[in-house]
Amino acid sequence: MKKTLFALALAALATTPALKADENAKTAPAAKPAAATTSTQPATAGKIVDVAPAAPLPPLTKAQRGRALEHFGWFISQGIQSYNLENFGFSAADLDALLKGLRAGAEGKDYAKTFQSVAEDLTRLLREAEEAARPKVEAKQKARLTEWIQTNQDFLRQVDKEPGVHQTASRLRYKITAPGTGPKPRATSMVKAKYTGKLVDGTVFDSTARANNEPATFTLDKVIPGWTEGLQLIGKGGKITLYIPSELGYREQGGGSSIPPHSTLIFDVELVEIVADAPVPVPAATPATPATK
């Protein structure tokens, strides 16, 4: 019940994009309909009628701001929804109010009864704060991304110097530690594989070890290009380390919250089995050329 109540109370908070300036008019009361008239003047339907813009809301007072942020801190302490506080550019005074609410939540105090009374002020405060902080936040994010791209490029340059590492025409780097046996899979083959995937900083973002070390089953042409190409280099039982540049991985989009944009991926892979090898397509028969007389 509590989760539903507060999810509704904060459904429009700053986790969604900030409102455009002209959207503030949506909060203004609708104009009352004009009184009925029997005038014989021509109807105005279809004509543009000037409507006075809604008056800007007065800024929140220091007390209103502090009370709203205190309740926000308490709300965060309930663990119902998470926020990236960096996006709001809070001042030291704002953070003091926020921490007061966090402390109250940690002490078991309940602000539920008064929360609705500050919800409108809090929604407005967070949206305005997010909008004001946006240029600074975006500049910081751009700087981080530039640094991350450089880190990934430097990593690949170091990989190129390691013994046993080879590079294909697509710029996939790989190192085979066990070639495996039997035929190698094709791009359309279904395989079973165990693997661990890491970023260049060593962060593990995925691993079959997390699923009781059970191998994953997939068709090679249904995964990222670096996998499609790399697993065709080993046979059953083979082991390979793939160094996949971002253009053969998740590119500028990244892979959800665990793989940043422009990430080089490092996979240690064991090809457990080729489950099904798609048949080689047979060319259509060419009609026989009629004999000439």
Image (cartoon, helix red, strand yellow):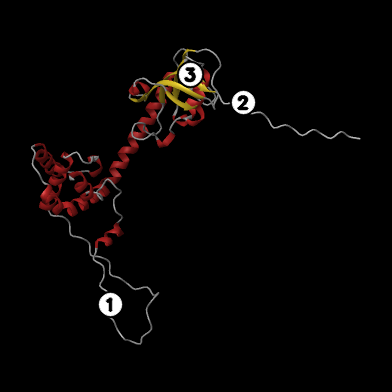
Q: Nearer the viewer, residue 168 or 33?
A: 33
- The disc, 2 or 1, on the residue closer to the chain's N-terminal end is 1
Q: Check disc 2 and report the residue beneath it.
A: 280
The residue where tag 1 is placed is 34
Q: How many marks?
A: 3
Q: Name which of mark 1 and mark 3 comes first in the sequence.
A: 1
Residue 202 visible here: no
Say if 49 sits above or below 217 in the image: below
Q: Quadrant of residue 260?
A: top left
How far apart in space, not on screen, are marks 2 and 3 (Cα)? 19 Å
- Residue tagged 3: 273
- How many neighbours does mark 3 have within 10 angstroms: few (below 14), some (14-19), or many (20 or more)? some
**Which SS class for mark 3?**
strand
Quadrant into which the N terminus falls? top left
Q: Earlier in the sequence, mark 2 or mark 3?
A: 3
- Which residue is depicted at the point 37% across and 22% down? 208
